[in-house]
Amino acid sequence: MDIFIQQLVNGLVLGSIYALVALGYTMVYGILELINFAHGEVTMIGAMVALTVIGLLVGVAPDLPGILVVLGGILVAIPACMLLAFSIEKVAYRPLRKAPRLAPLITAIGVSIILQNLAMLIWGRQYVSFPPLLPTMQFELLGAHISLLQIVIMALAVSIMAGLWILVERTRLGRAMRATAQSKEVAGLMGVNVDRVISATFIIGAAIAAIAGVMVSAYYGLAHYYMGFMLGLKAFSAAVLGGIGNIAGAMLGGLLLGVIEALGAGYIGDITGGFLGSHYQDVFAFFVLIAVLVFRPSGLLGERVANRA
Amino acid sequence: MQSSKLVVSALTLTLALGIGGCGKKDGAGGEVIRIGSVAPLTGPQTHIGKDNENGARLAVDEINAKGLELGGKKVKLELLGEDDQAEPKTATIVAQKLVDAGVVAVIGHLNSGTTIPASKIYHDAGIPQISPSATAVAYTAQGYKTAYRVMANDAQQGKALGEFAVNKMGARKIAIIDDRTAYGQGLADQFEKAARAVGGVMVAREFTNDRATDFSAILTSIKGKAPDLIFFAGMDPQGGPMAKQMKSLGLTARMLGGDGLQNANFVKLAGADAEGVVASSPGLPIDSMPGGPEFRGKFEAKYGVIQVYAPYAYDAVYALVTAMQRADSAEPAKVLAELPNTDLQGVSGPVKFDAKGDTVGGAVTLYEVRDGAWQVLETVN
């Protein structure tokens, strides 16, 4: 039983990270119907910038408490990612807004490759390790080990999601976002500054991605110019699973994907008597994704696909 | 038609460059001999890949500086570095690319998973291939007369590891994780065979891949089976976070790995949780190698810290070039005829090949992380 609870905790932490990154995919898709494949790389840049700042801070002020150092890293990474996402949107996507949908999609993949190589040039090919700054406090929960960092990651994911929901549903900017999502042209006629709303969407998604990037590198103890790729792919799958364009869906999809992966990898070997092993971890997650798409093409919480097309 | 003009001029340019490239003459009038070097230069294993290429480049630069004469003519070596991304399918593409570029030999690849599929292409083209680091038994077991390696293979390494785990570390119940690459799978199988033979019991066999960072699911599953030791057959980008996650999940089992873990980067990634991890590496520790300290000085002055296999890549180039010198030619067929007679005192130790192309008498050394650095435990022959 304690093994099962541990697997559940593993899955929820992994899922919270997926969910944070998935939010960025789903927000942009909700408004532009563009799959921003460069989003995973924005996460990576966030982690790298934060690590650089953390390295500098440790060098300059070695007596500073670890939490403040990490916080300093996050506080620099957020505006850096915001600026990056703003420029990406302005340079790569805005000129193509009226182009066929395939064009910005391919551009997004291009931006992702450019960012990866840029990061490789700046930070090198090496894995960058995250210094042991955060407390490694552990709790026992029904026999499962759970660390303070894991609790922080889950709490952060939930509160960011809640904050985003309030932003979209309860503020002026949120109303403008929803209007733009329904129809850019009509929203523009009603006095919504569509360009600004779209920029804002990218910027908010990037800020969340920066936080997610720092969390991932702190949790696994490393960062790498390549880390955004697989993370982005999984987060994108989570967004589709939950219903792309839907904020609560991204959260649900992320958590679900994390738990499916953990339980799948943890038990498949024992259940099938070693016939299928834990190398089917990813297959398992994507199998569920395919099943959901076959029976519910708009995702678990997605709607309005029919009248969009 | 502006665009068609552009195309024509681009074509002319390409042709001109192509002809220039085929000229095989350098400024000094000597002939240029091309040697390929393949390793992952992008992706998670980039640091190890670049290390291999730098090792080979150091040897090539040295030989060029000394001057090489074949068949009475001065020749110059040129190293063509290619990136196989540690992907078997990319490996065959770059292998073909090198063959088409007219290389006379290839130093590479880094991984067994890429070396094996590429070896067929080099075999079909009849050019020698010397891998500095591919350790899977299958590589030289294909019967290709073109396949060589300068490092002990996984049968030697797996045997040393399996016996060490049971006899010296006192492990009875053992869990194995491999990264599903040809290297990881092969080493894990050899380890399992050796450990079973001396009385070890396998309680779990789990899998991951060479891109993963999260191992909590498989480690939790392993924890339920309470092993004394976890053997990981894979590379440091996975091993580092795995060591961390073992500790945070409260696993008390010791961690053991192969040469994929035995590098500076693993200790950096695992931090304090690297303490007590044991790993092996074929060959002698770099400072015990006959030419080790000297090599370290030369290498670090140019490229920085040695990751793992750079001395082997360096020796591979020298094994190749001495064979060329004995053949007095760079022609692949003549070089291939001379390679079996290699008897070289390399920086990593004596380089001699058996009939299959494996190194004769490769030693395996075991290391443990103590106080944040790899310390030598013992060398097994």
Image (tube, coloured by chain):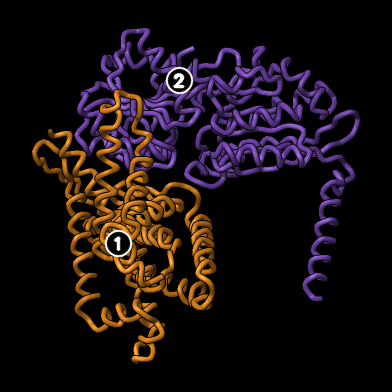
Work out whether B28 lies above or below A46: above
Q: Amino acid at mark 2?
A: Thr
Q: In the figure, residue B320 lies in which quadrant? A: top right
- Which quadrant would residue B101 be assigned to in this image? top right
Badges 1 and 2, same chain: no
The chain to which mark 2 is attached is B
Mark 2 neighbour density, 10 Å: few (under 14) some (14–19) many (20 or more)? many
Q: Is residue B212 above or below residue A118?
A: above
Left/right placement of residue B76 relative to residue B41 reads right
| Disc on res. A48 | none
Going 68% across and 20% down the picture, which residue do you hit? B144
User: Measured from the top left, where is residue B263 in percent x and y?
Assistant: 44, 34
Position of A93 with respect to B71 (left or right) is left
Q: Which chain is purple?
A: B
Residue at the far top in the pictured view: B198
Looking at the picture, which amino acid does disc 1 mark?
Answer: Ile
Q: Is residue A140 left or right of residue B97?
A: left
Image hue for chain A: orange
What residue is at 71 percent from the left and 26 percent from the top? Answer: B123
Q: Chain of mark 1?
A: A
Vertical position of residue B111 compared to residue A42: above or below: above
Residue B206: x %, y % from top left = 34, 28
Label 1 to label 2, Cα distance in Å?
43 Å
Label 2 residue SS: strand
The answer to whether B147 appears left or right of B42 in the picture is right
**What x and y, as percent, mark residue B364?**
48, 18
Does any portion of residue B300 appear in the rendered image? no
Residues tagged 1 and 2 counted as in contact (Cβ below 8 A): no
Q: Which residue is mark 1?
A: A211
Quarter of the N terminus of chain A within the rendering: top left
What residue is disc 2 on?
Answer: B365
Classify 10 Å Cα crowding around label 1: few (below 14), some (14-19), many (20 and above): many
